[in-house]
DNA sequence: GCCGAGAATGAATCCATCC
DNA sequence: AGGATGGATTCATTCTCGG
C-alpha cells in the first residue's frame, strides 16, 4: 500500500482513511495522543446505538455539528477494536514512546485493559476536570474526562513535570461534537519528549495536531471522515486558534 | 453472633472486627461511604507486599503512623475480596442506597468490576483532585483519587447536585496514612439522602463518621484494628475537626 | 472600558411511549 | 417483551449585550 497524504505541510501530515489500514504503514512515532470514539452514552444498548448527535448534543439551537463514525460498539467489541488499534499504534512507535488516550468514566476500565492488551505499559490516569458540565438531580455531576496513559516499554528520564489534573472549559465554538480545548491538548503534549513525532489516529477536527504544531512538534493525523480531514486541513493551514 | 459496639453515642456506633464478620449483622443502611485498603502501591508483588509505612510514607521525618491491615492482596484476590464485602454491604442496605468507595487509578478498573459483581448499579466516578501531590520526572503527577459510586437499584430523585470534582489538600495532621480530608468526606456526604444511616466498613481513623455526624447523619463504622477504633472513638467523643 | 443582567450550553440521564 | 424514540430536567460557566 502506498499512502498519499490528504494534506501536508512542513510539520503536519493528514491521512484520510481507516486507522487500522493506515497505522501499519507508519513508523518512528514518538507519541500517540488521541481521543477515540467512546462508544458510550447511556445505560442501555438502545441509548448507546443512537446517532452521535442525538446522544451528545442537547440543545436544538446549537450550531449544526455533523455526526462522527465508530461510536456504536458494544463493550466486548470496543475492547477488541481498541486492543487492535492500540497494538498497531505501538508497532508504529519507537521504544519508549508515550501513549495518551482520552476516555469517559464508563469505558475507562475497558480502555485500561485494551492499553495493556495492545502491549503498552499502563502508567496512570490523568484528569481533565471540566468547568460547567451538566447536572443530574441526586447524582454527582459528570464533570471529568480521563486520559489513560502509558509507554512502549521503559521511558527515558526527562526534566518535565506535567500536572495530573487540568481544569478547563469545553470550547464554545466547535466543529466536532467531542472537540477538546486547545489548552487541554497543549497540557497533554507536556508529556512528549522533545523532537518526538506525535500521532493522532482519530484526528477529528485536528486539535491534537494544532497543539502539537504550535509547540514545535511534527505531527501526523489519521481520520476516516473526509469532511473532518477538510476541517482539520483548513484549521492547520490558517493557524486558527480555538 | 451478638454484636457489641466498641463505641456508641446517640449518632455514631463503632464495631471492632473484620468487616466480613460484622456486615451480615447490620441492616437498614442508606449509604455506604468508605476508603478500603487499595492493595496498590507498585507494579510488582514485592512492592505491594511491603509494609504500608514503607510503601506510602516517603519522608523519614513524618510523624510515626501505625501500619494498617488488609493491603497486600494481588489483583484477582482484591477483586474477589472486594466483591464479597460489596455484596455483604449491599445486603445490609435498603433499596436505593448509595455506595461511594475511594480508590486509586491502579485499582479503579478492578473496583468498578467488583462493585457490579457485588450487585450494585455502577453510576459513575467522582474525582478528588489533590492540591500538591508528588511530581515524578517525565510523568503526569499522580494528583487524584477516585470515587467509584453507584446505588442499590433505582435511586429516588432528590434535589441535590453534588459536584463531580472536589479540589482539596491532604490533611497536614494525620492519624492514618490514607486519612482523607474532612472536606472531602463532607463533599461525598452530599450524595446521601436526608435521614439515611451511613456505613463505613473500613473506618480507619473515622473521618467518614466525623463528617457524617457533623452533617446530622447517623453513622456506623467497622474497623479491624483496635488502635484505630480507639483513635476514632476519641475523635468522635471530642468533636475534633481536622 | 467595566459591570451586571440575561441567555445559551454541555461526549447526560431517566422514563414514558410507541412499535 | 424488548428495543427504539423523544421529551423533560438541571446548574455552573461563559458569552452577549446594554448602560
Image (cartoon, coloured by chain):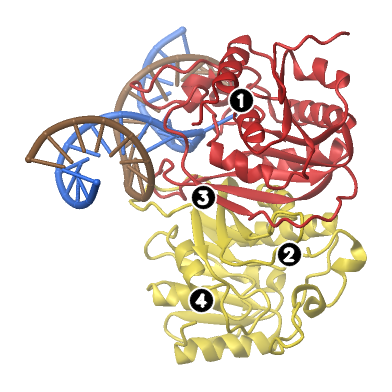
Chain colours: A red, B yellow, C blue, D brown
Q: In this view, does A94 lie above or below A137?
A: above
> Label 1, on which residue?
A206
Q: x and y percent of residue B64 in the render?
A: 72, 89
Q: Which residue is drawn at 50% across and 59% down?
A: B166
Chain to which mark 4 belongs:
B
Instruction: Single out the mark in the foreground, 2 or 1.
Output: 1
Q: Mark 2 to mark 1: distance in Å?
A: 38 Å
Residue underneath mark 3? A167
Indicate the position of residue D4 as horizontal and vertical percent values. 52, 15
Quarter where residue B195 is shown: bottom left
Q: Nearer the viewer, residue A129 or A80?
A: A129
* CB contact under 8 Å: marks 3 and 2: no
The reply to the same-chain question for discs 3 and 2 is: no
On the question of residue B38 being in view, the answer is yes
Label of residue B209 in the image? 4
Q: Mark 3 lies on which chain?
A: A
Q: Nearer the viewer, mark 3 or mark 2?
A: 3
* A138 w.r.t. A99: above or below: below
Q: Which residue is drawn at 74% across and 81% down?
A: B59
Q: Which residue is drawn at 79% across and 76% down?
A: B52
Q: Indicate the chain on which mark 2 is placed.
A: B
Q: Do the residues marked 3 and 1 share a common chain? A: yes
Estimate the spatial distance between the alpha carbons at disc 3 and disc 1, rounded to whole Å: 21 Å
Amino acid at each position: 500500500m502506498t499512502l498519499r497524504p490528504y494534506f501536508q505541510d512542513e510539520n503536519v501530515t493528514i491521512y484520510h482513511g481507516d486507522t487500522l489500514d493506515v497505522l501499519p504503514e507508519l513508523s518512528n512515532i514518538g507519541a500517540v495522543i488521541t481521543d477515540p470514539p467512546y462508544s458510550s452514552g447511556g445505560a442501555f444498548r438502545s441509548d448507546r446505538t443512537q446517532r452521535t448527535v442525538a446522544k451528545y448534543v442537547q440543545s436544538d439551537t446549537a450550531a449544526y455539528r455533523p455526526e462522527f463514525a465508530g461510536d456504536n460498539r458494544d463493550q466486548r467489541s470496543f475492547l477488541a477494536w481498541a486492543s487492535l488499534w492500540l497494538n498497531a499504534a505501538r508497532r508504529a512507535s519507537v521504544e519508549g514512546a508515550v501513549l495518551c488516550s482520552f476516555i469517559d468514566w464508563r469505558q475507562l476500565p475497558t480502555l485500561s485493559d485494551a492499553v495493556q492488551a495492545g502491549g503498552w505499559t499502563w502508567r496512570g490516569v490523568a484528569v481533565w476536570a471540566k468547568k460547567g458540565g451538566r447536572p443530574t438531580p441526586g447524582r454527582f455531576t459528570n464533570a471529568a474526562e480521563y486520559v489513560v496513559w502509558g509507554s512502549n516499554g521503559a521511558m527515558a528520564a526527562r526534566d518535565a513535570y506535567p500536572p495530573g489534573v487540568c481544569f478547563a472549559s469545553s470550547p464554545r465554538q466547535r466543529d466536532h461534537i467531542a472537540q477538546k480545548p486547545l489548552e487541554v491538548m497543549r497540557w497533554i503534549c507536556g508529556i512528549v519528549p522533545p523532537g518526538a513525532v506525535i500521532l493522532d489516529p482519530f484526528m477529528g477536527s485536528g486539535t491534537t495536531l494544532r497543539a502539537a504544531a504550535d509547540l514545535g512538534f511534527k505531527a501526523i493525523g489519521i481520520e476516516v471522515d473526509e469532511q473532518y480531514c477538510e476541517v482539520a486541513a483548513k484549521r492547520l493551514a490558517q493557524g486558527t486558534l480555538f
